C-alpha cells in the first residue's frame, strides 16, 4: 500500500479533464512516481493502489492509470496476479547482471569522455568531486549520494553521445533503489572518493583506456563487496530467482 498519503481534497472526474491536459498531467505524475521509486520513497516490492494514488495526488484515476502504464512499460512497476500493482523487484542474479552491464556502460561513457570532454566539463567534474569530499567529511550519506549521481550524470553528458548516455541513465535509474545500499556500505563513500580521483586523473590525461578501467571497476560489484551488498538489502526488495 502507498504510505504517508494525503487524502484531503476531491478527485477530478475524467470528463472534466481535456485530453491534452490529461496527457500533461499523466506525464507529470509519471515523473513524480518514477522519482519516488528512484529515490527509495517507494521501495521494490511495495504494493500500489490506483485509487490511493489518485487521492494522494488529488487527481482522477485516468492520469494515474496512464502514468502507471508508462512505468510498467519501462519495468519500474509490475502487475502481479492476486497482488495487483507492485513496485518492481529484481532477482539477485539479474541484479548482478545489471551491475555488470552498468559497469560496461559507465566505462564506455568515461572512455568517450576522456576523448571528448570539454575543459569546462572537466573543471565542473572537479568542482562536483570537491563537494563530494565535503559531504564525506560532514558524514552526510544522503547528500553524498545525490552529489555522486550528479558526478556520473556529467560523465554521461561529457561522452557527447545520445543513445549510449540514454541507455546508461535508464539502467542507472532502474537499479537506483538498490545502488543506494551500495553507497551506505561501511567505507564505501571513502572508496568512492579514491575511485573518482582515478577517473578524473584518466580524464585529465585523455587516457581513454584508463578511464574505461577506472569507471567500470568503480561500478562493478565483486567478491566481498557483492556479498556485503546482498546482505544489506532487505529480502522483500528481491524477486525470487
Image: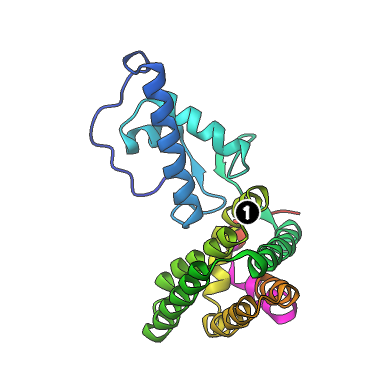
Question: Is residue 210 toward the left or the right of residue 139 in the image?
Answer: right
Which quadrant holds the N terminus? top left
Query: Where residue 165 sits in the image (x, y, percent)?
Result: 62, 54
Query: Where residue 91 sits in the image (x, y, percent)?
Result: 71, 56
Q: Residue furthest top?
A: 15
Q: What is the secondary structure assignment of the residue under circle 1?
A: helix
| Magenta-highlighted residues | 221-234
Q: Residue furthest left?
A: 9
Which quadrant holds the C terminus? bottom right
Question: Is residue 109 toward the left or the right of residue 121 in the image?
Answer: right
Residue at screen point 66% across, 47% down = 163
Q: Residue furthest front?
A: 119
Residue 100 visible? The answer is: yes
Instruction: Assess whether residue 84 is covered by the magenta stretch.
Output: no
Q: Total label count?
A: 1
Residue at screen point 41% across, 26% down = 61
Residue that carries the numbered disc 1 in the rendered image: 165
Residue 79 visible? The answer is: no
Residue at screen point 54% across, 82% down = 193
Residue at screen point 67% across, 78% down = 225
Amino acid at each position: 500500500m502507498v504510505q504517508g498519503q494525503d487524502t484531503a481534497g476531491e478527485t477530478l472526474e475524467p470528463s472534466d479533464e481535456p485530453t491534452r491536459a490529461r496527457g500533461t498531467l499523466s506525464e507529470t505524475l509519471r515523473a513524480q512516481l518514477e522519482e519516488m521509486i528512484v529515490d527509495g520513497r517507494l521501495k521494490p516490492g511495495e504494493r500500489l493502489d490506483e485509487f490511493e494514488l489518485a487521492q494522494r495526488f488529488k487527481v482522477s484515476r485516468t492520469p494515474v492509470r496512464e502514468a502507471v502504464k508508462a512505468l510498467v512499460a519501462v519495468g519500474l512497476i509490475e502487475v502481479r496476479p492476486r497482488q495487483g500493482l507492485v513496485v518492481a523487484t529484481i532477482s539477485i542474479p539479474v541484479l548482478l547482471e545489471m551491475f555488470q552491464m552498468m559497469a560496461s556502460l559507465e566505462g564506455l561513457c568515461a572512455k568517450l569522455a576522456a576523448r571528448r570532454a570539454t575543459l569546462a566539463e572537466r573543471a565542473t567534474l572537479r568542482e562536483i568531486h570537491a563537494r563530494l569530499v565535503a559531504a564525506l567529511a560532514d558524514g552526510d550519506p544522503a547528500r553524498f549520494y545525490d552529489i555522486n549521481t550528479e558526478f556520473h550524470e556529467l560523465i554521461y553528458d561529457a561522452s557527447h553521445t545520445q543513445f549510449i548516455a540514454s541507455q546508461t541513465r535508464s539502467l542507472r535509474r532502474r537499479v537506483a533503489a538498490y545502488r543506494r545500499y551500495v553507497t551506505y556500505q561501511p567505507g564505501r563513500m571513502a572508496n568512492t572518493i579514491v575511485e573518482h580521483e582515478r577517473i578524473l586523473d584518466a580524464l585529465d590525461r585523455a587516457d581513454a583506456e584508463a578511464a574505461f578501467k577506472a569507471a567500470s571497476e568503480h561500478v562493478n560489484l565483486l567478491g566481498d563487496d557483492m556479498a556485503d551488498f546482498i546482505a544489506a538489502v532487505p529480502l522483500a526488495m528481491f524477486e525470487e530467482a
